[in-house]
Image (cartoon, rainbow, N blue to C red):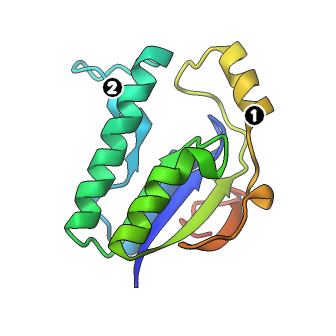
Amino acid sequence: MKTLTIIRGLPGSGKSTLADMTCKKWGIPRYFETDQYMIEPDGSYVWSPERLTRAIDLCQEAVGIEMVAGAPRIVVAGVFSSGLRTMQDYLDMALEYGYEVTIVQCLGEFENIHNVPVETLEKMKKNFVPNSEIPLVRPIVSLQNHYPVEETGSF
């Protein structure tokens, strides 16, 4: 069965690190995340609410291309703060292209390296829906939490 792994959590929770380790473990060349579309040509990261919508669209488009191509394993990392509502496009694509979905919530508390404003982080924390409140609906087959203790790349 083809799988889509969605790694979610607040900024600084370890999403990118877990996604990178998971891809290496599974032999996947890359993972997808909205942050990848916030990088300027000079390599600097620039976060802004105005850029976020476009970055989300580009990330979903890239994942859709992978699904159409039949990639056996796809990993997406992002905040997905509002639970199923913010993941719905990915879940719809997973159903359409025959992917089972595992949702992993990262629970680390590391430095916010992307300079997201404090007030924005507070709103994200306030509105974040934990995995424990997400219903297990098709195509979701597993909801898990990840506590980063070592660099194992597993959940």
Q: Residues within 10 Å of mark 2 (few under 14, many from 20)?
A: some
Q: Quadrant of residue 25?
A: bottom left
Up-down: is 56 above or below 18? Answer: above
Q: Which residue is mark 1?
A: 127
Q: Quadrant of residue 7?
A: bottom right
Name the secondary structure under disc 1.
helix
Q: Quadrant of the N terminus?
A: bottom left
Q: Quadrant of residue 97?
A: bottom left
Residue type at numbered disc 1 = Asn
Q: Are marks 2 and 1 in contact (CB under 8 Å)?
A: no
Q: Residues within 10 Å of mark 1 (few under 14, many from 20)?
A: few
Up-down: is 20 above or below 117? Answer: below
Q: Which residue is mark 2?
A: 39
Residue appearing at x 53%, y 72% in the figure: 139
Q: Nearer the viewer, residue 10 or 88?
A: 88
Give whichever of discs 2 and 1 has the lower sequence position. 2
Q: Quadrant of the C terminus?
A: bottom right
Can see residue 25?
no
Residue appearing at x 63%, y 36% in the figure: 12
Instruction: Pinpoint residue 89: horizontal percent, then vertical percent.
Output: 45, 51
